[in-house]
Every structure is written in structure tokens, then in C-alpha cells.
Image (cartoon, rainbow, N blue to C red):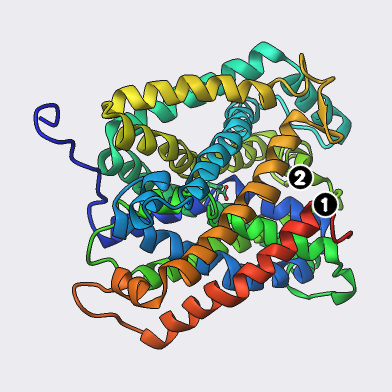
Amino acid sequence: MTSAGPRVRGRFTGTLGAVAATLGSAVGLGNIWKFPYMTGESGGAAFIIVYVIATFLIGLPVMISEHVIGRTARSDAIGSLRKLAPKEPWWLIGTAGVIAAFLIIAFYTEVIGWVLIYIVKAFSGQIVTTDPSVTGAAFGSVISNPWLALGLQWVVLAGLMAIIIAGVSRGIEAMVKRLLPILFVILLIIAIRSLTLPGASAGLEFLFKPDLSKLSFGVVLAAMGLAFFKLSVGMGTMITYGSYYPEEQDIPKSAVRVMLGDLFVSLLAGVAIFPAVFAFGVEKAAGPSLMFITMPTVFSSLPGGPVVQSIFMGLFFVLAACAATGAALSLFEVPVAFLEDHTGWSRKRAAIVTAVALAVAGAFPALAESWLSGVKIGGLNLFDAFDFASSNILLPVGGLFLCIFLGWRWGWPQVKEGLTNKGSLDNQGMVRFFYGVAKLISPVLILVVLLGGLGVLGG
Ligand code: PHE
């Protein structure tokens, strides 16, 4: 149908579909893996408070900016900026975004691959043990097996590609709408189990009772970096999704909903994890391996015997897979939208080319613990280097320039026009406030994160 006339751009089915897809992008391994391990490492509630502030002052304004840019221009991350500011170099922000999407998806799909194999390991009872050295060895054998690492990543890429080919509304939106309720129910079940364990209250205290002495410059930087990654901002994902938003979408309102929904999922994940971690006295500051090494020992300590233990453990990894899918789809969509908008290729062709390119890029982090274990960039292995380069450099740089573009190049009259829904704009006071934040406050804060992340400010 579309092959004859001009190509019809994808569109979410309605305001609810748009919110669901966007929430599906925000909710991801960030909630189930990064947020808990960073909270565990960085002192609990104090870290969470800084993270929430960063979400309000950086994440939300950048998200609103991206959505309005995308919906106004109705193009991909690069094309949108090119359309709004022709013959000016702002499109380079979009280019950095496409590169960031590549770097993130390269390591993200590898983590999803581990999650998939852990679903099998957990349900089959292979990792029911309270000995972290056993779960550590099991994890080590997964990440150090090069063919397994590559194979898992290819399976994930093929699955994502199939959903992407099905389309923006019939693929991405439909999938996310199915996964979000499953995710929520599993999270609730695990949270209730965790909260009803004897000794759970110490975990709640860790999550909600701030010990401000834990705050340091490093903690503040980590929280700000997480705010970018969590809300999928600073790299054009949200421009791309904004370009699929319906005309009548109230952008500030839906961005607030997405932010609150995402925060709720993170906190609930914390409630599912920390009370149990404290109840069984396992190491809470395990870092990135929290999910794969510590959590299996936590589930193996649950009362009820090995069958109950493997069911809860399996559900936890199903939860992670459900969360990760929507986020990975939004990353995958960034280069696909670019190719579709600029080459005239069909969606199918764009998705296949993207998947192959991602398989090549993804091999670097996938092989970081095997064939490429000797390769280090600035002391980091390739997996950590991809994570660092995207979260700590490319996303903040992208966010910084997006705010500057919005506040200083595009300006309030255009932004207001772009946000207007069918001629009217609700909550004008709040919207102006966020515009002011995006113009004046976010860029300064981001600059601090950026320089800090690069070590210029120490900390
Ligand atoms: N927000 C996703 C998560 O929390 C990660 C992501 C980052 C997705 C950037 C898209 C773009 O896991």
C-alpha cells in the first residue's frame, strides 16, 4: 500500500498509546538493574533524593523539549533539527544521538541476552544457591563464553527487529501495551514477598530514610547521569517518539506522567529488592553484578523450598526482560527512523540493515570479557566504556545542546506554538516554568555533570 504513494510516517494510535510507548522506553534495565545497584552503592535514600531532583530539573525539561521538537518537525532525530534550523549545525546533536543509540543498544542487548539465559537458569533451578561464589562463577561462565555472548545478542536483535518491522503502532506500541501490565504485576508480587520477610524494615529504612552524610560530589554526578539514561533523553529517542505523537497530545502533561510512572517503577523495584537483601544480610553494594550474582542468592534464601525459590527468581528475570524490551525498541527505532526518513528505504529494509550494524557494534561489548578482554579504553573494558561514553558523555552533551537549542535558538513563541494542542495550551504557568528551567537551569546543571563525569571537576 505504501510502496506506491509517498511513505506514510508511523503514528501512535492515540494519546494513551503514546504515553504507553514512551513509558515503555523509559522503563527498562535502568529500573531493575542500574537504579538498584547505584542506590545500593551510593547510600540509599540520599542518592534517591538527588536522583529525583535531577529528574525534575534535567530529565523532565529535556524530555518535553525533545517531544515538542519531534512533533513539530515530524522527522527523525537528525531530520527534525535540520527542518527546524535549516543550514545550521544543530543537526549534529541528532547525529550524536544516533551514535549514542548505537553505543547503548550495543551493551544493552547483551544484558538482555544475559537476562534471557537467566530466565532459563532460574526456572530450571540451576542457580538455587546461597553461596555468592557459586552464582559468581555461573555468571562468569556466561560472560566469558564468546559464542554464547554473541549468540544471545543476535537472538535479542532478531526479536527486536521483528517487532520494529511490524511498525510503530502495531509493533512497538502494541508490544509495550502488553508488557507493561505483566511487568507491574510481577513487580508487585515480588515486592509483597520481599516486604513480608522478617527483617524487611531495614531495607525500607535504607531506601527511604536519608543519611545525608552519604552525599558526595560523585553521588550527585551518578544521580544526574542516571536521570538521563532513565528517561531515555539526550539522544533523540524522545525526538523520534515525539514525531509519532498525535496532534492532540498534551506534551508536558504526558511527560510528567511518564516521569512519575517511571519513578514509581524504580521505587517499587527498590522495594522488591532491598528489604530482601537486608533480610538475608547479603552484600548491597555489589555494583553491576547485583542483579546476576547477588539477586539469585537472595531468592535462594526465600522460605518455601527450591521450587518456590526458583519461581520467584525466574519471575524476577522475566520482569527484567519485559522492562528491557520497550526500552530496547525505542533505541532500535532511532537509527531505523533515520534510515526511513533519509533513504526512502522500506521499514523492513531499514530494520534489517540496522540489526546487522548493531550486531557488529554489539560484538565489542559482548566480547569484553572473552576475546576482547585485553582491550581497555581509559582503564575500562569495552562493555563499561560503551556505558560510560554514552551515559556520561553523549547523553549529557546531547541534552545540553537540546536545551540550548530550545531556549536560545528556537525561543518561547515557537515552543509555545509547538506545544499548543489544537489552539490551546493548558497549565501555561507550569509550561513556562519548565521552559525557563530548560533554558537557564538545566544547561548549567548538565555542564556540571559533564565536566564532573570527565573528571575535570574531580569527585
Ligand atoms: N531508559 C532506559 C532504561 O532505563 C534506557 C534507555 C536509554 C532507553 C536511552 C532508550 C534511550 O533502561
Structural crowding at the residue carrying mark 1, measured as other residues with C-alpha within 10 Å and reported as few (<14), some (14–19) or many (≥20):
many
Relative placement, left or right, of 308 versus 137 is: left
Which is more toward the observer, 325 or 9?
9
**Can you tell which quarter of the image residue 162 is in?**
top left
- The residue that disc 2 covers is 298
Q: Which structural element holds mark 1?
A: loop
Q: Could you say which quadrant of the image residue 418 lies in?
A: bottom left
Q: Is residue 230 left or right of residue 258?
A: right
Using the rendered image of the protein, determine whether residue 337 is visible from the camera's viewpoint.
yes
Give the amino acid at mark 2: Val
Q: Are marks 1 and 2 in contact (CB under 8 Å)?
A: yes
Residue receiving disc 1 = 280
Q: Which mark is residue 392?
A: none
Question: Which quadrant holds the C terminus?
Answer: bottom right
Residue 72 in the image: x percent, y percent?
Answer: 30, 60
User: Is residue 109 placed above or below 65 in the rendered structure?
Assistant: above
Give the residue displayed 76% in from the left and 45% down from the top: 298
Q: Name which residue lies at 78% across and 71% down.
A: 46
Image quadrant containing the N terminus: top left
Who's the residue at 63% across and 20% down the image? 363
